[in-house]
Image: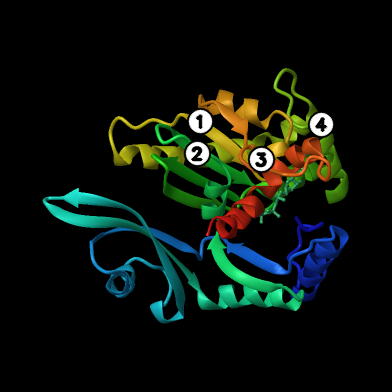
């Protein structure tokens, strides 16, 4: 989270990364980074089962039809999710991620600029998904509400089925408070964090945030409808909230009552062991929603 809503230049970002690494006395210099946003394409394909190298080539051809960028400019990778039988033919379900080369290169040059070594580039949704434990018999919606972007993911039977970014998040709540109550951005930001949402009686801060929150709910409903329409009999069991704006007081209750689905904060610490002498559990739990992507990215390397 950068301290202001303005887009920052490369130097500022590199300095901010370096500062975080130094201040927290991070011992490693190896980094896994993720990308997100509408220029990242995530597609699901069913392909005949074949050897891995052939599959890679076949996917490249197939996915060309579905991506929104010039295939020559795309960096692609895939993951085999599971094997399925279809009309007597063994097939594999794969998820393919494609990103514009320039975006990946920019991200890597930020890491290298800060004197760090990039190990891998992942997709933010995948990191979120990996950061927590979801039972294989439930359908969960993972919602990351950040500063500029809200990212919605739907996981069913341990597979990520749906992923979408909306440019509406914490900064929009702050801007609305700033406009309604005539405060500057920083004052509004403080009010937002101190007061949060109150459902019982409508405070001025709550009233100011109503517009952007209602628009978010409309977008969530739209995504749910799209997902549910794919297969009859589907339902969504719960909503798990991530990102800094998940810490907005009362947001879980608000979403629960407006969407009619139980909503709660993520706890990415559930299956992570740590030295309780060196790290304060309460502090880590408080950071949890903002750190979920980082935990998910770190797990990727720890597991491989
Ligand atoms: N206690 C809190 N109450 C309400 N909002 C909060 C609180 N703490 C942080 N936020 C909001 O969380 C947002 C930052 O979240 P996060 O760190 O997840 O963003 P980001 O990942 O940098 O942004 P993005 O994902 O949009 O690029 C800011 O809008 C900030 O105001
Ligand atoms: Mg984020």
- Where is mark 1, residue-wise? 238
Q: Nearer the viewer, mark 3 or mark 1?
A: 3
| Helix, strand or loop for disc 1 | strand
Instruction: Identify the mark nearer the N-term, 3 or 1.
Output: 1
| Helix, strand or loop for disc 3 | loop
Residue at 44% of width from left, 42% of height from top?
155
Quick check: marks 1 and 2 in contact, CB under 8 Å? yes
- Where is mark 4, residue-wise? 195
| Helix, strand or loop for disc 4 | helix
Residue at 23% of width from left, 62% of height from top?
49
User: Is there any visible trace of residue 241 in the rendered image?
Assistant: yes
In the image: residue 177, left or right of residue 97: right
Q: Residue 255, located in which quarter of the rendered image?
A: top right
**Pick the front one: 155 or 165:** 155
Q: Residues within 10 Å of mark 1 (few under 14, many from 20)?
A: some
| Helix, strand or loop for disc 2 | strand
Distance CA(mark 1)–CA(mark 2): 6 Å
Quick check: marks 3 and 1 in contact, CB under 8 Å? no
Q: Nearer the viewer, mark 4 or mark 2?
A: 2
Q: Residues within 10 Å of mark 3 (few under 14, many from 20)?
A: some
- Where is mark 2, residue-wise? 141
Quick check: marks 4 and 1 in contact, CB under 8 Å? no
Residue at 78% of width from left, 37% of height from top?
281
Distance CA(mark 3)–CA(mark 2): 19 Å
Distance CA(mark 4)–CA(mark 1): 26 Å
- Where is mark 3, residue-wise? 269
């Amino acid at each position: 989270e950068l301290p202001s809503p303005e887009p920052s230049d490369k130097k500022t970002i590199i300095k901010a990364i370096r500062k975080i690494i130094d201040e927290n006395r991070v011992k490693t210099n190896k980094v896994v980074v993720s990308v997100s946003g509408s220029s990242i394409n995530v597609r699901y394909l069913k392909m005949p089962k074949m050897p891995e190298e052939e599959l890679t080539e076949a996917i490249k051809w197939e996915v060309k039809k579905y991506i929104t960028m010039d295939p020559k400019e795309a960096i692609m990778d895939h993951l085999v999710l599971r094997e399925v039988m279809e009309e007597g033919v063994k097939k594999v379900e794969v998820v393919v991620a494609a990103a514009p080369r320039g975006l990946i290169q920019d991200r890597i040059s930020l890491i290298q600029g800060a004197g760090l070594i990039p190990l891998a580039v992942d997709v933010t949704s995948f990191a979120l998904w990996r950061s927590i434990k979801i039972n294989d018999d439930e359908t969960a919606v993972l919602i990351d509400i950040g500063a500029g972007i809200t990212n919605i993911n739907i996981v069913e039977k341990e597979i990520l089925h749906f992923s979408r970014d909306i440019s509406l998040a914490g900064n929009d709540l702050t801007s609305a408070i700033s406009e309604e109550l005539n405060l500057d951005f920083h004052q509004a930001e403080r009010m937002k964090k101190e007061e949060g949402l109150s459902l019982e009686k409508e405070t001025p801060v709550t009233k100011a945030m109503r517009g952007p929150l209602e628009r978010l709910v409309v977008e969530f409903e739209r995504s749910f409808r799209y997902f549910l329409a794919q297969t009859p009999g589907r339902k969504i069991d719960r909503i798990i909230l991530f990102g800094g704006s998940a810490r907005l007081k009362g947001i879980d209750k608000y979403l629960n009552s407006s969407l009619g689905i139980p909503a709660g904060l993520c706890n990415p610490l559930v299956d992570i062991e740590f030295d309780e002498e060196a790290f304060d559990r309460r502090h880590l739990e408080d950071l949890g929603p903002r750190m979920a992507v980082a935990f998910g990215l770190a797990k990727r390397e720890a597991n491989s």
